[in-house]
Image (cartoon, grey):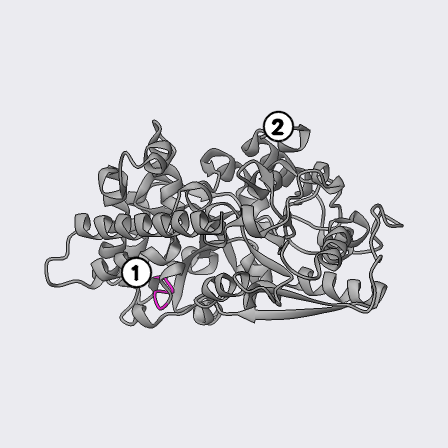
Amino acid sequence: MGKHLKIRTVVLGFMLICVCGCGRSREAAVGPTVIKEPVYQWGNVSGRTISVWGRESDLSRSYITRAFERYEELTGNTVNVVPYSPDQIEQAVIDELGRSDSELDLLLYFGGANLDAFHPDVNFYDFSEAQWVDDLTDVSINQAIYHGKVIGLPHWEASVSGTLYNKKLFHKLGITPPRTQEEFQEACRILKQNGITPLYLPCASPTMLLYQFPMDAAVDEHGVMEALNDGNIGYQDIGEMYRIVKWYRAMAQNGYLGDNYLENSWDGMSAALESGEYAMMLCWDTWLYTDFEGNPSDFGLMPAFVGVPDQGTFEGPNLSLLLVNKNSAQVDASLDLISFMADPYNYNAAFEGIYTAPVFRQQMASISTPQYVEAAGWIEENYRNSIAWLNIKGFSQSDAACILKYMVSEDGYTARQCLTDMEMLRQQRISSYTEASAKKE
């Protein structure tokens, strides 16, 4: 492969990027961007309306809307945002990509195995030789690669995931942020004993169970990932997976998720944490600055203690990519928008004052979250790349529906049955992708 596709050392690169941003204050970051003129060519098309599809919550990110508004202002073109709910977006895109008169020009979506259903080799533009590829950080380029090609432009916040915790509640009850699974369970016991629901888990949407956090550790040992992808083993053959699904059931049965946890939704996350009725939530640090309506300084970040590993884990970022439908009638306009958003002259304006580690090497206007700065040493000790969600063939967050079934089951539905069902869904997904690809070819 060429220089653009060299896989670099991800963990070190990400940690250096974050640490370099830690010393800057919010005030220092806000102001005129350093890049004073365009670096790339764009604005070569006019009078166009470019349709960008994605999840509603993703398309409403402030740095995304800033970039689109700036593009419209500087080029006279129009960006038409087409939002979908998380449960609708995949099927909507599949249906649209199959149309000869598709109205989808660009898609904002997460990379890796998440793209399998869309047959990227057939449907999305290859940016491997784009000028801006060398400006991507190590984390960014690795998440942008699909089947050896740079398949899209990462334009997203680089977050660290773990457990957000209410520092005031912990201090009031004398709870030290736990360092082991056992200490986490003890913290939950104390919280519940004092009338506080330990963890808000948005079980109304299985995708928010976030079981990929502990899976990063479960599949990153002794060739487990390769064995899964080669079909030599299934989820039910991985010992750590039993600990993971049993953790969810125990949290529910112990009352650590509250009485009405099945009704908890994504939309209720902010209110739940702001109310003080819940002490913790599995999430990522930048959420506090993109979605939370309370005071972010009330919360710290500690590892995710979801059964494995014993010391918990911080997961590295998952980046959304801007992907160009190469079968669209407006590929030229879509590429113009991509060049615009990849230009440091523009992305520094879009990310100005935004809490995130850089996704571009010349990204100077963003800053690290205080939660990251406070826990930087802890994160370095227990950091893991996001590999399960990106690299396991057929992986889907929606398969957590089986975990939910196990959590509430009273008819003898076992952990093994849960994992066997999850593996069956994964294999069905792989087969459907393979069959669909064969038909397209």
The numbered dot on residue 401 is 1
Density class for disc 2 (Cα within 10 Å; few <14, some 14-19, many ≥20) is few
Q: Secondary structure at mark 1?
A: helix
Q: Secondary structure at mark 2?
A: loop
User: Which three-letter amino acid code belongs to the residue tagged 1?
Assistant: Ala
Residue at horizontal 71 percent and vertical 36 percent from the top: 134
Judge by depth and name the residue closer to the eye, 73 or 34: 73
Residues drawn in magenta: 199-204
Judge by depth and name the residue closer to the eye, 69 or 18: 69
The numbered dot on residue 1 is 2
First of labels 2, 1 by sequence position: 2
Could you tell whether 168 is left or right of 43 in the image?
left
Residue 64: image location, x then y, percent = 67, 61
Residue at horizontal 47 percent and vertical 34 percent from the top: 381
Secondary structure character of the magenta stretch overall: loop
Residue 83: image location, x then y, percent = 57, 70
Res. 287 visible in picture: yes
Res. 176 visible in picture: no
Residue at horizontal 50 percent and vertical 57 percent from the top: 299
Quadrant position of the N terminus in the picture: top right
Q: CA distance from mark 2 to mark 1?
A: 39 Å
Residue at horizontal 47 percent and vertical 51 percent from the top: 114
